[in-house]
Amino acid sequence: MEMSEVKWKKSSFSGDRDECVEAGALNGKVVLRESDDPEVIVSTTPAKWRAFVLGVKAGEFDHLI
């Protein structure tokens, strides 16, 4: 699978803006990109992504916004 085949998903909280982070799946990894700079790609494992999402839901990163 190539990057062009990734089905990118952004948060519904982003609205119509192009300034958000998008997530997708590629070869068993979670991939993230900047919607306004789609060449910037970060990949991680599903386990690490889950831990991060749980931290976000728990408010651990609220001090950054």
Image (cartoon, rainbow, N blue to C red):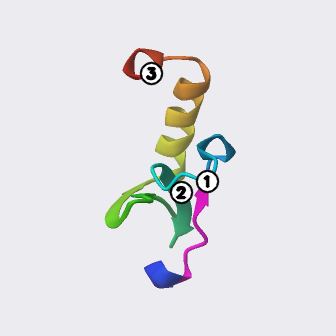
Q: Is residue 20 above or below residue 63?
A: below
Of 20 and 22, which appears nearest the observer? 20
- Give the x, y percent position of residue 62: 47, 18
Residue ID at (45%, 50%): 19
> Can you tell which mark lies on residue 58?
none
Q: Is residue 29 above or below residue 54?
A: below
Which mark is nearer the camera, 3 or 1? 1
- Give the x, y percent position of residue 28: 53, 66
Query: Which amino acid, by three-letter code, is at mark 2?
Result: Ala
Circles 3, 1 touching at the beta carbon (< 8 Å): no
| Highlighted range, magenta | 5-9
- Magenta segment includes 8: yes
Query: Which amino acid, by three-letter code, is at mark 3?
Result: Phe
Mark 3: which secondary structure? loop
Location of the C terminus by quadrant is top left
Q: Is residue 42 left or right of residue 6?
A: left
Q: Which residue position holds label 2?
A: 23
Mark 1: which secondary structure? loop
Q: Which residue position holds label 3?
A: 61
Residue ID at (59%, 29%): 54
Q: Which residue position holds label 1?
A: 16
- Magenta segment includes 58: no
Of 6 and 34, which appears nearest the observer? 34
Please report whichever mark, 3 or 2, sits nearer to the chain's N-terminal start: 2
